[in-house]
Image: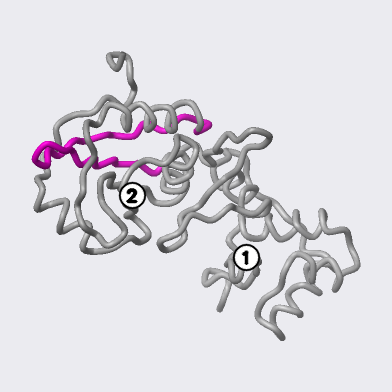
């Protein structure tokens, strides 16, 4: 059943104490742990978020209080992980599953690489969603962030015009420091779609940065553009 599994489990070089020490560092940008795998879809979100950001490690068999509880046999978890990484992630993510024996139970260490071909989408019932890792949480990427990721991973160069709209944008940023797509569209009196495209191109050209606060995207000058 598992002989053709892209993410076939292997015995880890880590031992119980290694996993315990890793868990004690707590969840963060590069680490997430779960007592069990709730569903293939939910674990696909974790895998995709790590793959779209800087990669990371998933520990299965670790409780919220960082205690190691293990799982009874890893086969079901391995099946769900393979389904998540290979079937629900688009493109598929080649994760590495390692097993750490823990008495009559097992701990799973899943290593998720940062992928080159971004973004990785998670297939839902009606839509495909892009998740990003932000501190210790997975966040849904905005339309603008997805377009920026695509442009940064494209072979095509990024061009933009320094016209009246851009001049008004830079004057606004000089005064207020940050702007949203909605506010830019209002300031320049253009459609939201055109405002979004302009800001995305400026971020892709490293003129602006995109930051997210309270589930809202803000655009600011990038350090490279500051003099």
Would you say residue 93 sits in the magenta stretch? yes
Q: Quadrant location of residue 196?
A: bottom right
Q: In this rendering, would 201 be left or right of 37?
A: right
**Where is the C terminus found, in terms of image quarters?**
bottom right
For the residue labelled by badge 2, is the local secondary structure a helix, a strand or a loop? strand
**Where is the N terminus found, in terms of image quarters?**
top left
**What residue is disc 2 on?**
34
**What residue is disc 1 on?**
215
- Image location of residue 148, percent across then percent down: 61, 51
Would you say residue 212 sits in the magenta stretch? no
The crowding category of the residue bearing disc 2, from other C-alpha atoms within 10 Å (few below 14, some 14 to 19, many at least 20), is: some
**Which segment is the magenta one?**
89-114
Q: CA distance from mark 2 to mark 1?
A: 25 Å
Residue most extreme to the right: 189
Badge number at residue 76 = none
Depth check: 142 or 151 in front? 142
Identified at 60% across, 64% down, the residue is 210
């Amino acid at each position: 059943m598992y002989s053709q599994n892209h993410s076939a489990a292997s015995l880890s070089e880590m031992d119980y104490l290694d996993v315990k020490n890793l868990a004690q560092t707590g969840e963060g940008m590069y680490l997430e742990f779960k007592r069990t795998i709730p569903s293939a879809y939910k674990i696909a979100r974790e895998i995709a978020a790590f793959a779209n950001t800087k990669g990371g490690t998933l520990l299965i068999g670790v409780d919220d209080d960082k205690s190691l509880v293990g799982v009874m046999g890893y086969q079901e978890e391995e099946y769900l992980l393979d389904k998540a990484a290979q079937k629900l992630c688009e493109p598929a993510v080649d994760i590495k599953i390692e097993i750490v024996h823990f008495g009559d139970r097992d701990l799973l260490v899943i290593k998720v690489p940062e992928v080159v071909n971004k973004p990785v989408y998670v297939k839902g019932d009606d839509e495909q969603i892009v998740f990003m890792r932000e501190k210790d949480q997975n966040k849904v990427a905005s339309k603008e962030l997805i377009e920026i990721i695509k442009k940064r991973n494209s072979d095509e160069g990024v061009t933009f015009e320094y016209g009246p709209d851009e001049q008004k944008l830079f004057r606004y940023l000089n005064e207020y420091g940050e702007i949203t797509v909605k506010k830019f569209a209002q300031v320049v009196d253009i459609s939201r779609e055109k405002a979004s495209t302009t800001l995305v191109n400026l971020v892709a050209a490293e003129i602006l940065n995109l930051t997210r606060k309270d589930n809202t995207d803000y655009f600011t000058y990038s350090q490279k553009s500051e003099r």
